[in-house]
Image (cartoon, rainbow, N blue to C red):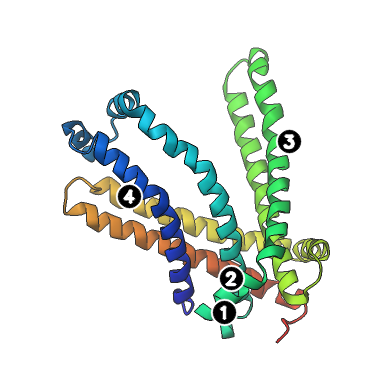
Amino acid sequence: MRQWRIAAIVYAIQLGLALTLGMQVYEVLEASIGRSLEINKLLSHYDHTVLTDFLKVHGASITPLVGQLRWLLLVWLIFSVFIDAGLLYCAARPEQASGRFFWQGGAVYFFPFLKIGLFFLALALVWTALIWIPTAVLLEPSLEYFSTEQYPVWLVLLLMVVWLLGLAVLFVWSVASRLQHLSTGMSVAGSLADGWRVFRSRKAHLLGLLTGFVALQMLLVVLYFTLEGYSGMTSVPLIPVFFAVQQAFVFFRIQIRQMMYAAIAETTKGRRPPLPV
């Protein structure tokens, strides 16, 4: 909680990125459906018919926005590497954490962390392909050999658990590797190798930490949707109220990420040299 100013910086960066597309979406919606009475139907509940009719009539104005998403994702990849570098830099040295420290860490370690991030992104894509491409190819033909559809459903659920577990391992390994680079300043390849050794030596603790923080995230999501289910943005006064709740939710999620980074740094501290002064 002492690093709330750093979380505020990350929140401001994310908000700025979201506004670049959000303002364009707002202008399109205002010009096309902003004065339509049909939009009132969306205040009380989801209405598939209204959205379908909107896409049929105004789909041409939405298509350019969808095309911009790929560029926004590229920009977000770059900013996310910078943000993670700053957050990890502060998590590894909490006694010196400050706004200036965050910007310094993001700038100094951006390129090494970009290489590490691209490496793990490639591993995640390979892992995803290994799990889901054979599943997509074999699932439909296999339905003929099962007496009930329950078996394919349970198989898919089991594969989902295996896939998520693999992604969790990659995530913790990536954090450990970046912490190794922060501590030793060794090459990217050396940091990856040492990060894997650190992960193997503390895998139960690290995966347990990750599970706890994921559970906390899910608890927040359930809490928010419970509040939204009881009331939601069903009137003009409630719109700013729930907007504020949403932003508080986003801000606390950033703090949870920093809590997780700090916990992993503390857990692996005994397995790596102290950070240089």
On residue 226, the disc is 4
Q: Position of residue 56 (x, y in %)?
A: 34, 23
What element does badge 3 sit on? helix
Alpha-carbon distance for marks 2 and 1?
7 Å
Question: Which one is in front, 206 or 234?
Answer: 234
13 in relation to 58, above or below = below
Instruction: State the residue at coordinates (48%, 66%).
Output: 10
Q: Are marks 2 and 1 in contact (CB under 8 Å)?
A: yes
Q: Position of residue 180 (x, y in %)?
A: 75, 70
Residue 241 in the figure: left or right of residue 132: left
Is tag 4's residue or tag 2's residue first in the polypeptide sequence? 2
Q: Which residue is mark 3?
A: 130
Q: Which residue is mark 2?
A: 86
On residue 101, the disc is 1
Q: Position of residue 27 (x, y in %)?
A: 30, 43
Alpha-carbon distance for marks 3 and 1?
40 Å
Q: Are marks 3 and 4 in contact (CB under 8 Å)?
A: no
Is tag 2's residue or tag 1's residue first in the polypeptide sequence? 2
